[in-house]
């Protein structure tokens, strides 16, 4: 088999992909994303780890450096830079989170915001000594919870769930009690893509008098989220995944308005203080969501995600979700037809309504196969021990890319069998 043939999808899936692409009402938006100078990527299937850049972001970054940074210099801080974390936070809240203004802020990494919010949550529930987290949650979430528990003399109560699915009410209920202070869960599981029933789980946590913190890293801008309507307490999430903020773009935090007055986070920095430029003695938290901040905001790193917010505002989350479900359904169909006969197993919920925008396939050969896929320009990612994760960023991924990617996996598996 020549390399060319190996990369081409079999006629039927390629034709189906072409039909789906032609019928995709969002297809024109794909051209707004940049490809590299040598354009060696045939199928980018990792937009859930790092979204592609929008062309508008290249222009925005260049313009910012030349006009704002070079032109305004130190004056820029008073002309909007200092408020950018709140301004961009409100836009994320409005466009993607169902969050009214004044509750979302952009700041540190997801890990650091998790730490700040978990610590703050413990103090909002005095007398309760258990933190609940699931064994299959993203590593950083587990480590932060373990770290805060050690620091504060609390107990971690672990929830077990089906790794090919995720936490459901029946998994969480036995862990809840009058000792529970906080429950940390992911809305879309990083491995399986399981979409947690967030409203129901939040209610379960509240029935026990505890608080919930949702990690939205794989959910924001891929599935509709309604933090205010679900009465969520706290949330964090990435902006470099489906918000296309670029490598190292800062995370966001949400604190429900009803908790803000009592909310105290442990990294007491000058820019989270009331009236920071008074340079006064002692720390008094700033009013409102600004108190989540600590130091100087990463202004350059908040630029690109604003272009994705422009696009998401134009398109709307319901249309994004509709295309996303079609993409994962197409990928799951092709995997069943072409990969299951070679021993590949779907390690994600079978129902598109129960999953986010990515799928995980499992096979013992995937660890060795992943670098070979990358060398061919087919880019999923590998998750130990044997998961191949296909992340289908709804606005930048075509159905043709899905067909090309699955065909490449099939050809490499068939070759080594
Ligand atoms: C990607 C991801 C993170 C990343 O945290 P960083 O501090 O940005 O490295 C955290 N939690 C979840 C669930 C993720 O998917």
Image (tube, rainbow, N blue to C red):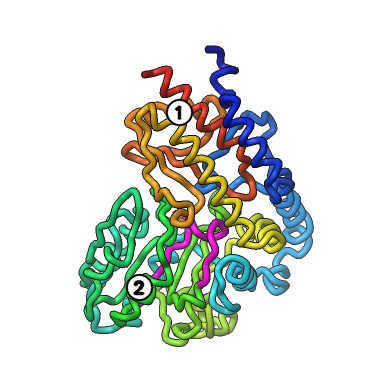
Tell which of 220 and 408 is nearer to you: 408
Tell me, yes or no, whether the highlighted magenta stretch contains residue 114: no
**Tag 1: Cα neighbours inside 10 Å, few (<14), some, or many (≥20)?**
some
Q: Secondary structure at mark 1?
A: helix
Q: Check disc 1 and report the residue beneath it.
A: 371
Q: Which image quarter holds the C terminus?
A: top left
Image point 22% across, 69% down: which residue? 174
Tell which of 277 and 68 is nearer to you: 68
CB within 8 Å, label 1 to label 2:
no
Quadrant in the rendering for residue 194 = bottom left
Image point 46% across, 32% down: which residue? 337
Rendered position, 51 above or below 101? above
Tell me, yes or no, whether the highlighted magenta stretch contains residue 218: yes
- Assign the magenta stretch its main secondary structure: loop
Rendered position, 164 above or below 334? below
Look at the numbered disc 2 and say if its residue's Cβ is closer than 8 Å to ligand 1: no
Reading the chain from its start, which is encountered first: label 1 or label 2? 2
Q: Which region is colored magenta? A: 211-226
């Amino acid at each position: 088999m020549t390399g060319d043939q190996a990369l081409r999808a079999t006629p039927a899936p390629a034709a189906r992909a072409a039909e789906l692409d032609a019928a995709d009402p969002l297809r024109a938006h794909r051209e707004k994303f940049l490809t590299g100078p040598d354009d060696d990527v045939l199928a980018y299937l990792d937009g859930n780890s790092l979204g592609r850049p929008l062309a508008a972001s290249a222009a925005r970054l260049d313009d910012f450096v030349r006009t704002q940074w070079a032109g305004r210099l130190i004056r820029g801080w008073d002309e909007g830079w200092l408020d950018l974390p709140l301004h961009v936070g409100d836009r994320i809240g409005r466009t993607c989170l169902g969050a009214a203004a004044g509750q979302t802020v952009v700041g540190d990494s997801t890990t650091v915001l998790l730490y700040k919010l978990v610590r703050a949550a413990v103090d909002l529930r005095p007398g309760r000594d258990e933190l609940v987290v699931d064994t299959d949650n993203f590593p950083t979430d587990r480590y932060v919870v373990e770290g805060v528990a050690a620091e504060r003399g609390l107990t971690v109560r672990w929830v077990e769930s089906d790794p090919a699915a995720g936490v459901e009410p029946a998994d969480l209920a036995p862990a809840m009690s009058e000792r529970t202070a906080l429950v940390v869960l992911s809305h879309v599981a990083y491995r399986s893509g399981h979409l947690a029933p967030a409203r129901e789980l939040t209610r379960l946590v509240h029935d026990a008098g505890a608080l919930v913190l949702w990690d939205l890293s794989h959910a924001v801008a891929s599935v509709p989220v309604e933090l205010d309507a679900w009465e969520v307490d706290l949330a964090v999430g990435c902006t470099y995944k489906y918000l296309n903020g670029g490598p190292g773009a800062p995370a966001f935090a949400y604190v429900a308005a009803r908790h803000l007055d009592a909310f105290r986070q442990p990294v007491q920095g000058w820019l989270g203080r009331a009236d920071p430029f008074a340079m006064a003695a002692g720390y008094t938290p700033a009013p409102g969501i600004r108190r989540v901040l600590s130091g100087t905001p990463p202004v350059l790193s908040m630029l690109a995600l604003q272009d994705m917010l422009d696009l998401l505002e134009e398109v709307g989350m319901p249309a994004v979700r509709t295309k996303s479900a079609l993409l994962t359904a197409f990928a799951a169909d092709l995997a069943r037809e072409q990969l299951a006969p070679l021993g590949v197993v779907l390690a994600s919920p079978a129902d598109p309504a129960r999953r986010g925008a990515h799928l995980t396939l499992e096979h013992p050969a995937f660890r060795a196969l992943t670098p070979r896929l990358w060398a061919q320009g087919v880019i999923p990612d590998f998750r130990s021990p044997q998961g191949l994760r296909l992340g289908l960023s709804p606005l930048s991924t075509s159905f043709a890319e899905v067909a090309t990617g699955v065909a490449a996996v099939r050809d490499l598996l068939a070759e080594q069998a």
